[in-house]
Amino acid sequence: MRPKPQYPLNVKLIFIGITLAFVLFFILRTNISNSTSNTPSSTTSHSAITNKDSKHACSSTCTKIPSSLSQALIHYSTTNITPQQTSKEISVSSKVLQKKSPCNFLVFGLGHDSLMWTALNYGGRTIFLEEDEAWINQIKGRFPMLESYHVTYDTKVNEADNLIGIGKGVECTSVGDPRHSMCSLALKGLPQLVYDTKWDLIMVDAPTGYYDEAPGRMTAIYTAGMLARNRDEGETDVFVHDVNREVEDKFSKEFLCEGYMQKQEGRLRHFTIPSHKDGVERSFCP
């Protein structure tokens, strides 16, 4: 998720709105919880409570905005750099996050929207996989709280036609741990935690894929689908950005499956992929 052409600042506004709504919900939920769990210990009248006591009581029941959320609000309200996705595209993923967060969220790519995704998944674990180590260091210098890892890819966009043919073979349509797969599309060198974690959401917005010699997203898309299928139970929401491009279009349809697609908004596709290890007989694609 390297820098891309910028979009109108309404992306900034939708993020601020979503975050403020989340913060309000967080505060109200905490206050309601505290008020229902604490019963009065005496019949002291309201008029007998002093200002000092009121301030003391508020300190034990009022909730501050978490620092990660306040930093995100400040950043997106003051920067001229907007996230790579449009407001409508962001809303697709944010609606799923509203239902599932706090959750485990895996993102292929590190970019200007990474702080936003981490904030929207407040309380959960959001990690980023990035091809450019210098870019990781640059982003970490600004936002050290983001959890990101350097990964390498050994493919090129101009190999896509050959790889999609390989991907139709039995070694690639057999569901299993990508680390032990015989399929050349499976990413085997990712951090250990990627394979060991049950991901609720996966976003594929990297690696670079807009020129022939770029690594392309062929293996990232395939591996995202395999991580979803290989979980023991439940389902994973997978999002692929830039589906206006040939690789993202073909590979998402082939390996995430049109039958699992929930929605397309602009250049973003949303798939919901169930476990293929939960005892239910399923073909690779429905």
Image (cartoon, rainbow, N blue to C red):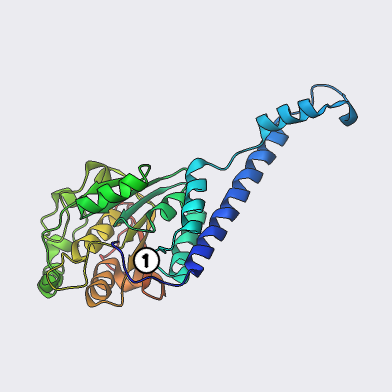
Q: Nearer the viewer, residue 124 or 262?
A: 124
Residue 32: x %, y % from top left = 69, 40
Residue 78: x %, y % from top left = 49, 57
Q: Is residue 195 above or below residue 283?
A: above
Would you say residue 30 is visible in this rendering? yes
Indicate the secondary structure of the residue bearing disc 1.
Answer: loop
| Residue 52 shown left or right of residue 266 in the figure | right
Amino acid type at image mark 1:
Gln
The residue at 11%/68% (across/down) is 166
Judge the density around disc 1: few (<14), some (14-19), many (≥20) Cα neighbours within 10 Å. Answer: many
The residue at 15%/69% (across/down) is 168
Q: Is residue 89 above or below residue 183?
A: below
The residue at 40%/63% (across/down) is 83
* Quadrant assignment for the C terminus: bottom left
Residue 100: x %, y % from top left = 48, 52
Q: Residue furthest top?
A: 42
| Residue 108 sits in quarter | bottom left
The residue at 79%/26% (across/down) is 40
Provide the residue designation for mark 1.
84
